């Protein structure tokens, strides 16, 4: 995991937590000609992988635009975003295969301030659209004229004073990244599409669900949000209390990991997904995991990590909470 602040040289906030980005699978133009026969989705801390099987239900080839929508990055609010990679373009290291053969997606990246496209201006000054890894921005080292131009254009925003009382700045644009390709689905044939990437994993060095914290009235609204977002059960809390105890301090050294997955883009097909399987890999059998399964049912009485559904129409996204020692 890479926090954006580590690569940019703007002021860091005293916060050990990192926020997760909501990312999903491939997205296709809505069509009634192609049906999704099956989707096998695995979500883990190390990798998200999806295997789709599509069937062209017509008697002629169908060409569709395939897209992998990466989340917009608002650099003015990105101090603690969990980036899985330091690649400033493919920052989740995604890969796609069609019938077992790796295929490229065309990546387009733009920088916006409000409705204004400032991509050309940043490139004029040889500045990265997404400052990650070795493509960082040392704002204090920019020529004064360049810095003034960026400030006047709204690309740099005030970010407090340094120890010498000098005004500091941080990037203020939004980076938009899209990856697309045109894919032909042959007539009356099944096509297998596989897609994988490294997820953005949110993290916290403690969990508000520990008994020593959730009893606090001040944290009540946050505890209720967790219960709602992750469908936390009393049994989950009882097991957490057994491991963590009731001390105010986190003596058990339990931490949180969080993954958000955009599932609703799977509803773009001719009818529902005929067979859907979700596998959650929390990284260890000792880790506790919770999410809202909706219509999904455990694949067996003894398997709490795999869920299935037939004729599935996704109507909600997934938020997964994992608690344990990392």
Image: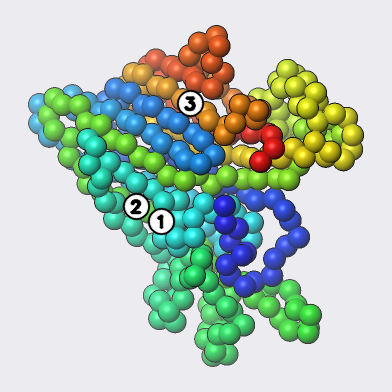
Looking at the image, which is closer to me, 194 or 179? 194
Q: Which residue is mark 3?
A: 279
Q: Nearer the viewer, mark 1 or mark 2?
A: 1
Q: Residues within 10 Å of mark 2 (few under 14, many from 20)?
A: some
Of the residues under marks 2 and 3, which one precedes in the sequence?
A: 2
Q: Quadrant of residue 116?
A: bottom left
The picture quadrant where one finds residue 250 is: top right
What colouring does the structure picture have? rainbow
Q: Which residue is mark 1?
A: 90
The answer to whether 193 appears left or right of 281 in the picture is left
Q: Residues within 10 Å of mark 1 (few under 14, many from 20)?
A: some
Q: Which residue is mark 2?
A: 179
Mark closest to the chain's N terminus, 1 or 2: 1
User: Residue drawn at (60%, 31%), measured in percent from left and top?
Assistant: 284
Q: Secondary structure at mark 3?
A: strand
Q: Is residue 49 left or right of residue 154?
A: left
């Amino acid at each position: 995991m890479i926090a954006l602040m580590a690569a940019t040289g703007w002021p860091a906030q005293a916060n050990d937590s990192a926020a997760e980005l909501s990312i999903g699978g491939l997205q296709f133009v809505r069509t009634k000609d192609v049906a999704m026969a099956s989707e096998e989705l695995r979500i883990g801390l190390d990798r998200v992988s999806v295997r789709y099987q599509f069937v062209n239900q017509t008697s002629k080839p169908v060409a569709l635009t395939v897209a992998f929508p990466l989340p917009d990055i608002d650099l003015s609010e990105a101090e603690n975003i969990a980036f899985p990679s330091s690649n400033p373009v493919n920052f989740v290291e995604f890969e796609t295969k069609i019938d077992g053969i790796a295929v490229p997606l065309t990546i387009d990246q733009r920088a916006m301030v409000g409705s204004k496209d400032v991509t050309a201006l940043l490139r004029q000054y040889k500045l990265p659209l997404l400052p990650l890894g070795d493509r960082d921005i040392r704002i204090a080292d920019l020529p004064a004229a360049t810095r003034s131009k960026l400030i006047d254009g709204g690309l740099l925003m005030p970010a407090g004073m340094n120890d010498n009382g000098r005004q500091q700045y941080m990037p203020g644009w939004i980076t938009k990244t899209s990856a697309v390709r045109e894919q032909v689905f042959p007539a009356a044939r099944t096509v297998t599409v596989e897609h994988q990437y490294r997820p953005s994993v949110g993290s916290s060095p403690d969990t508000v669900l520990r008994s020593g914290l959730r009893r606090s009235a001040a944290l009540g609204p946050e505890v209720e949000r967790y219960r709602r977002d992750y469908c936390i059960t009393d049994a989950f809390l009882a097991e957490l209390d057994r491991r963590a105890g009731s001390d105010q301090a986190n003596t058990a050294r339990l931490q949180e990991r969080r993954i958000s997955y955009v599932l609703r883009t799977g509803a773009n097909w001719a009818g529902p997904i005929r067979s859907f399987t979700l596998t959650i890999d929390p990284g260890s059998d000792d880790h506790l995991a919770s999410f809202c399964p909706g219509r999904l049912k455990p694949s067996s009485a003894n398997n709490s990590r795999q869920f299935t559904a037939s004729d599935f129409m996704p109507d909600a996204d997934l938020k997964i909470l994992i608690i344990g020692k990392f």
